[in-house]
Each structure stands twice: as C-alpha cells, then as structure tokens.
C-alpha cells in the first residue's frame, strides 16, 4: 500500500510539474505575442506615415508636371492631345472614381470639348482631373494621363485667349 501511495505521490508531483511547465510556456508565449503585436503596431504606424508622405510627394509631383504641361501647351509645344480622349473616357467609366456622377459627366463633356472651351472650363477640367489623379495615382494605370491632358488643354486654351496661366487653388 505504501508503495502505491509513493507511486501516486510521484505521479501527482509529475502532473503538477507538467501543469507548471505548461503554464510557464503559455505565459512566455503570451508575453512574446504581446511584444510581437506591439512591434507590428509600431511598424504599421511607420508604414502609414511613409505612405502619407509618399502620397504628398506624388501630389506635389503631379502639380509640378501639370504646371509644366500647361506651359508647354500654352506655347504650342505639345500637340495632338486629342489622341488621349478615348483612353481618358475609358478611364473615367471603368473605375469607381472619387467623382460624383455629375462631376464624372462634366469631366467627360469637357474631355469631348477639347480645345473648344473657355479658360474657366479649362480650369474646371484641371480641378476634376486633379481630383481624379489624387485618388487614383498608383491604383489606376496611367492615371497621370488625366493630369497631362487637362494641363495641355488648359495651356492651349489660355494661349488661345492670350491669358496668363495662374495656379489653380483647390
């Protein structure tokens, strides 16, 4: 009987040691997991910051290129921008874009007008193109063409009316 009791004592001790070992591993796993999650949060915060900075740089670059194209269009260095109309029409109809339905329709009307618009309409085209580009740069292939077209047309129209190009403030 003593032997059975001693054997049960060892079994109980082994069982308790096993439980303590499992609890220790679970504690270490939980602590390590919390640390890993915190590192992931910090990393995600850094990525979000970098993406925001990249978006600001892309918008600035888009504004610069649009201004450059406007000036080249005004001087009639850029020609045949009408060739882009089909691509732009497809771009505005195949994407769920940030424009309201009225803005999308207006953008298509202005694209169809081409050089036969007023400077005010050219400004409106540039604003709508900028809105489209800011949302879809990097998401829609060749979204920059919208800015290119709007900038070239705006420059051409301003040149036709012999008006000085001024920055568009959103």
Image: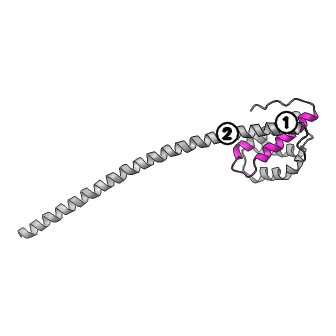
Give how far across and how far down residue 83 sits, in percent: 88, 51
Q: Quadrant of residue 152?
A: top right
The N terminus is located in which quarter?
bottom left
Q: Is residue 93 left or right of residue 55?
A: right
Is residue 118 something that shows in the picture? no
Residue 144 highlighted magenta (yes or no): yes
Give how far across and how far down residue 60 sits, in percent: 71, 37
Q: Is residue 44 left or right of residue 114?
A: left
The C terminus is located in which quarter?
top right
Q: Is residue 155 left or right of residue 16?
A: right
What residue is pinned by disc 2?
57
> Of marks 2 and 1, which one's residue comes earlier in the chain?
2
Residue at (67%, 39%) from the top-left corner?
57
What residue is pinned by disc 1?
71
Q: Neighbour class for label 2 at 10 Å: few (<14), some, many (≥20)?
A: few
Q: Is 3 rendered above or below residue 143?
A: below
Q: Quadrant of residue 13?
A: bottom left
Residue at (21%, 62%) from the top-left corner?
15
Residue at (48%, 47%) from the top-left corner?
40
**Element type at marker 1?**
helix
Q: Neighbour class for label 1 at 10 Å: few (<14), some, many (≥20)?
A: many
Residue 3 highlighted magenta (yes or no): no
**Element type at marker 2?**
helix
Give how far across and how far down residue 21 sits, in percent: 26, 57
Q: Is 120 rendered above or below residue 94?
A: above
Q: How is the image coloured?
A: one colour
Residue bounds of the magenta highlight? 132-161
Residue at (93%, 40%) from the top-left corner?
116
Q: CA distance from mark 2 to mark 1?
A: 21 Å
Q: Main secondary structure of the magenta part?
A: helix
Q: Is 7 rendered above or below residue 149?
A: below
Q: Residue furthest left?
A: 2
């Amino acid at each position: 009987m003593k032997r059975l009791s001693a054997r049960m004592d060892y079994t109980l001790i082994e069982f308790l040691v096993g439980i303590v070992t499992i609890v220790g591993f679970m504690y270490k796993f939980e602590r390590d997991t919390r640390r890993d999650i915190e590192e992931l949060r910090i990393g995600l915060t850094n990525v979000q910051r970098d993406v925001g900075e990249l978006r600001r740089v892309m918008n600035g670059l888009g504004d610069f290129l649009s201004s450059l194209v406007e000036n080249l269009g005004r001087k009639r260095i850029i020609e045949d921008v009408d060739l882009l109309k089909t691509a732009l029409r497809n771009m505005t109809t195949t994407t769920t874009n940030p424009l309201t339905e009225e803005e999308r329709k207006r953008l298509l009307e202005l694209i169809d007008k081409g050089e036969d618009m007023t400077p005010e309409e050219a400004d409106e085209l540039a604003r709508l193109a900028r809105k489209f580009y800011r949302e879809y740069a990097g998401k829609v292939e060749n979204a920059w063409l919208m800015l290119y077209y709007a900038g070239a047309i705006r420059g051409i129209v301003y040149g036709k009316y012999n008006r000085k190009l001024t920055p568009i403030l959103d």
